[in-house]
Image: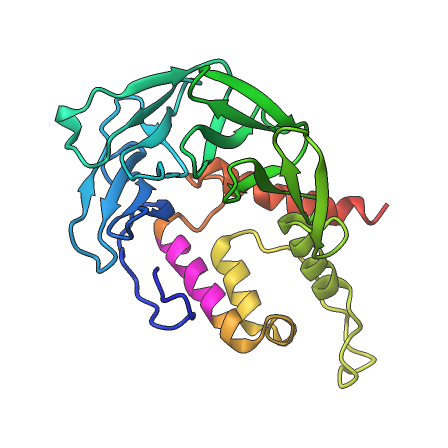
Amino acid sequence: MINRADGNGERQLTNDPPLDRNPTFSPDGQWIAFMSNRSGRNQIWLIRPDGSGLRQATDASPGAWSHNPWSPDGSSLPYTYATTTDMFMFDPRKPWREQSPQFLSSDVDFTPMSWSPDGRQLLGDGGSQGHEQIFAYLFASKQFTRLSEVGTSWTWLRDSRRLLYTFHGKLFVLDSVTKNAREILSVAPDANTYLLMFTLLKVGMEDEKPASESADKRSRLRFLPGTLKDAMRLFKASELTGKILGEGSKEKFLSYKQASANRNPSELGTAIKDAEVIYHHEVTNQYLWNRF
C-alpha cells in the first residue's frame, strides 16, 4: 500500500499471493524496494510508486533477506543470505546479471535497518535470536561496533552520530560515540505487540456479562480462536474492538488480515509460517500464565 504524506490517496501496488515485505523508498523517490517470495525464494524486488516497472533486483541462490535500507546516493542496498550470516551489498540500478555483489562481513548475524546519512555506517540488530543487540557496521574498518545490549534499532538521525531505538515500549535516542541513551517517549509501560494482544484477549475473555443476559442461562464457553478465520470472525463481531480501535481502523485491520488469510491455510500448524504459530502460542501462554 502507498499513500501521500498527509495520509490520503491510499493505493495498493501489489495484489497477489506472494508475501511482499519491508518496502522502502529510494532516496530520489523513484523506486520502492521490497522483499518478496514471488519467484520462489525471498529476493529483493523493485517497483515504481505508480505500480509500474516491477522487476526482480536480486537472484541470490540461497535467497536474499533485507529491510532494504538504501545508501544515501541510491547506489547500494545491503542484504544477507537466508541460511548464513554472510552480508553483501549490490547496485539496484543494474540488472542482476551485471552485478558483482560486494561481500561485507559474516562476523555477526546482522540485520541492517538504516544507512547513515554520511554513508559511512549501517545500523541494525544482531546476535542470537531472543537476545538481539544493536550494532553499527563501519565500512572503513569493515568491523562491527556494539552500541547497545538491548533494544530494537530504527534509524540514524541526520548527524550520523545519534540514532533511535525502542525498548519495552519506550523510544530512546542513543549517541553512537559515547553510548549514552536518553528516553524521549514512552507509550505505555512495557508496551509491545504481545502485551497489547494479551490485553485485548483478557478484556474479551473476562469482561462482565451484559446486563441483558439472563441469570438462569448457562455461562458461555470462552475460548481462544484456533484458526485465522475464526479470529477474524470473532474480531469483526466484537463491539469492544470497534470501541477500542474505532470502526475505520477496525475495518482496515480486517482487510489486511483478510489479505494474509488468502495467502495461508486456515488451520494453524499445517503449512502456515512458523512465526504465525509462535505468535499464536505466545499470546495464549501469556494469558494462561496470568491466571496463576
The part of the chain drawn in magenta is: 252-262
Q: Is residue 188 left or right of residue 43?
A: right
Residue at 50 percent across and 32 percent down: it is 123
Counting from the top left corner in percent of width and height, residue 238 is at 60, 72
Up-down relation of residue 68 to residue 1 (above or below): above
Counting from the top left corner in percent of width and height, residue 260 is at 40, 53
Camera sees residue 221: no
Q: Quadrant of residue 92?
A: top left
> 70 or 211, which is in the foreground?
70
Quadrant that contains the C terminus: top right
Residue at 26 percent across and 34 percent down: it is 40
Residue at 64 percent across and 35 percent down: it is 175
> 209 or 20, which is in the foreground?
20
> 181 or 65, which is in the foreground?
181
Camera sees residue 246: yes
Q: Is residue 258 magenta?
A: yes
Q: Is residue 36 magenta?
A: no
Residue at 25 percent across and 57 percent down: it is 49
- Colouring mode (rainbow / by chain / secondary structure / one colour): rainbow
Magenta stretch: dominant secondary structure = helix
Q: Is residue 80 left or right of residue 226?
A: left
Counting from the top left corner in percent of width and height, residue 247 is at 54, 77
Up-down relation of residue 219 to residue 269 (above or below): below
